[in-house]
């Protein structure tokens, strides 16, 4: 039954998002022409500025798109599913530039900045299953709980990295610094067992929810403490969940899930833009709040 529902949603999505893809592609093309004109004048030095032109164009399209507005107006998980089903990957090439635009749910993964006593215990269990020392979670807690005047940290991470930001984990590059410290401090390569790209996302909001209609396999494993096969089943059937009953969880799984803040519809997009021109490359990502029409948590990697 869920398969039929999903097929029906895919068919509807194909119809209602074609114009959105066309509009955003035209906007990218216009931005590319501006970038190309600028590049002939200032070349590599202005690549970040040029990239920012594209970001502004894409945000403008998101703010004015009827398909995106429909998600906010209806507050419907179905409309969000329709949008992401057909507009998740848009490649574009023009004037020597290659661009890939990706739209995903920004709440498909767990934000480690949300760690509290209950979720920390869940993460310790998950890491233990992946043969990672529990001290790793203590190090994460050091990096999200701010400056301690008495220097009562769980680890020596700030002895080694005194200027490391410690209010929250900002990006994957920030996490890589944390992971490098753990690997060197404990001479432990076990973090290679963890698919962090599917487990964590990063944002300053320490009260965000996981959208269960987009939760990854790794996040289901974390939340439920279940086997990979069970987590894969829940992830593959995503898009049709409307309430807890539709998840068909056991009592133990439900109890574990209650440790996390979850939702069945989080209208926040994770936008990724990959830009390449000759030897210049940029990867830009940010969150876009559909209801408030605002971008946040911008990360530029040039």
Image (spheres, grey):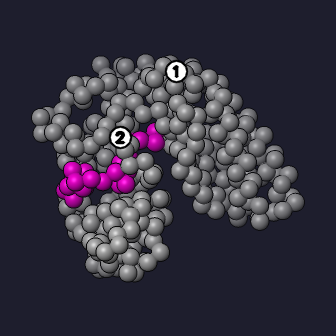
Q: Which quadrant is the C terminus positioned in?
A: bottom right
Residue 137 at what x, y percent from top left? 27, 63
Q: Residue most toward the front? A: 149
Residue 286 drawn in magenta: no
- Dot 2: what SS? strand
Q: Looking at the rendered structure, which numbered label has been put on residue 210? A: 2
Residue at which label 1 appears: 73
Q: Residue at x 32, y 75 (%)?
A: 151
- Dot 1: what SS? helix
Residues rendered magenta in the picture:
105-126
Picture quadrant where residue 234 is located: top left
Residue 235 at what x, y percent from top left? 32, 38
Mark nearer the N terminus (1 vs 2): 1
Picture quadrant where residue 16 is located: top right
Q: Looking at the rendered structure, which numbered label has been put on residue 5? A: none
Q: Is residue 187 visible?
A: yes
Q: Residue 110 vs residue 227: left or right?
A: right
Q: CA distance from mark 1 to mark 2?
A: 21 Å
> Front-most of 49 and 282?
49
Q: Residue at x 45, y 51 (%)?
A: 203
Q: Which quadrant is the N terminus positioned in?
A: top left
Q: Residue at x 62, y 34 (%)?
A: 62
Q: Residue 26 vs residue 138: left or right?
A: right
Q: Are marks 1 and 2 in contact (CB under 8 Å)?
A: no
Q: Residue most toward the left? A: 251
Residue 122 at what x, y percent from top left? 21, 52
Q: Does residue 111 sit above or below 69 in this rendering?
A: below
Residue 106 drawn in magenta: yes
**Mark 2: few, some, or many residues within 10 Å (few <14, many ≥20)?**
many
> Front-most of 210 and 225?
210
């Amino acid at each position: 039954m869920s398969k039929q529902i999903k097929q029906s949603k895919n068919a509807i999505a194909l119809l209602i998002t074609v114009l959105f893809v066309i509009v955003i592609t035209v906007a990218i093309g216009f931005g590319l022409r501006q970038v190309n004109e600028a590049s002939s004048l200032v070349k590599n030095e202005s690549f970040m500025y040029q990239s920012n032109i594209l970001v502004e164009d894409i945000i403008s399209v998101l703010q004015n798109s009827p398909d995106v507005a429909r998600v906010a107006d209806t507050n419907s998980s179905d409309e969000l599913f329709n949008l992401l089903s057909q507009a998740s990957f848009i490649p574009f090439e023009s004037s020597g530039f290659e661009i890939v635009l990706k739209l995903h749910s920004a709440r498909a993964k767990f934000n480690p900045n949300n760690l509290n006593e209950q979720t920390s215990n869940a993460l310790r269990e998950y890491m233990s299953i992946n043969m990672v020392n529990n001290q790793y979670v203590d190090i994460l807690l050091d990096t999200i709980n701010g400056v301690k005047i008495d220097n009562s940290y769980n680890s020596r991470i700030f002895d080694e990295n005194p200027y490391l930001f410690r209010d929250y984990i900002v990006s994957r590059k920030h996490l890589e610094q944390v992971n490098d410290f753990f690997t060197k401090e404990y001479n432990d390569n076990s973090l290679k067992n963890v698919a962090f790209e599917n487990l964590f996302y990063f944002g300053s909001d320490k009260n965000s929810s996981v959208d269960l209609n987009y939760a990854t396999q790794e996040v289901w494993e974390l939340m439920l403490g279940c086997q990979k096969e069970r987590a894969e089943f829940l992830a593959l059937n995503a898009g049709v969940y409307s309430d807890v009953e539709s998840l068909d969880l056991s009592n133990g799984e439900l109890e574990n899930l209650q440790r996390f803040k979850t939702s069945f519809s989080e209208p926040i997009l994770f936008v990724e833009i990959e830009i390449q021109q000759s030897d210049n490359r940029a990867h830009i990502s940010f969150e876009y709040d559909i209801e408030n029409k605002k971008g946040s948590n911008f990360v530029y990697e040039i």
